[in-house]
Image (cartoon, rainbow, N blue to C red):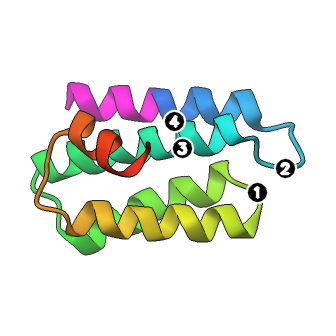
Amino acid sequence: MKKTLLAVASISVAAFAYANTSSDSSELVSQQCKISAEAVSTLKGLRYGNTSIRKDVAGLINLNLKVQENKDAAQMTLNRMVDDQVNSASALEEKYCS
């Protein structure tokens, strides 16, 4: 539960920080990847189903990113993270956000 709250807080901070930009910076895309990795890891740890994880994290991606190409790329990365057997946020970040 503590990790879930941390993930939500991180996402909220990122969304607020970049809410007024008209496009996505590379820093925002990178930050979204890291937030997705943390959220996927946390939700896997809570034994959420893959469909629920995809739906919840995709909602966050759509809120934070504005450029459709970046949303599509983030969604593809999210799907690979969910399907991966790795559960650690740091391992997911290293594998998919580098």
Residue 97 is situated, as x and y percent measured from the top left of the image, at 43, 45
Which residue is disc 4 drawn over? 11
Which residue is disc 3 drawn over? 32
Q: Earlier in the sequence, mark 4 or mark 2?
A: 4
Q: Amino acid at mark 2?
A: Ser
Residue 73 is situated, as x and y percent measured from the top left of the image, at 56, 66
Report the Cα–Cα distance between label 3 and label 1. Answer: 12 Å
Q: Earlier in the sequence, mark 3 or mark 4?
A: 4
Residue 81 is situated, as x and y percent measured from the top left of the image, at 29, 60
Which residue is disc 2 drawn over? 23
Report the Cα–Cα distance between label 4 and label 2. Answer: 18 Å
Count residues near mark 4 (Cα–Cα under 10 Å), then give few for <14, some for 14-19, many for 20+: many
Tell me if residue 9 comes above or below residue 81 in the rendering.
above
Q: Which residues are magenta?
A: 1-9
User: Which residue is pictured at 25% across the width and 29% down the height?
Assistant: 3
Report the Cα–Cα distance between label 4 and label 1. Answer: 15 Å
Instruction: Give the side of residue 57 with respect to residue 50, left or right.
Output: right
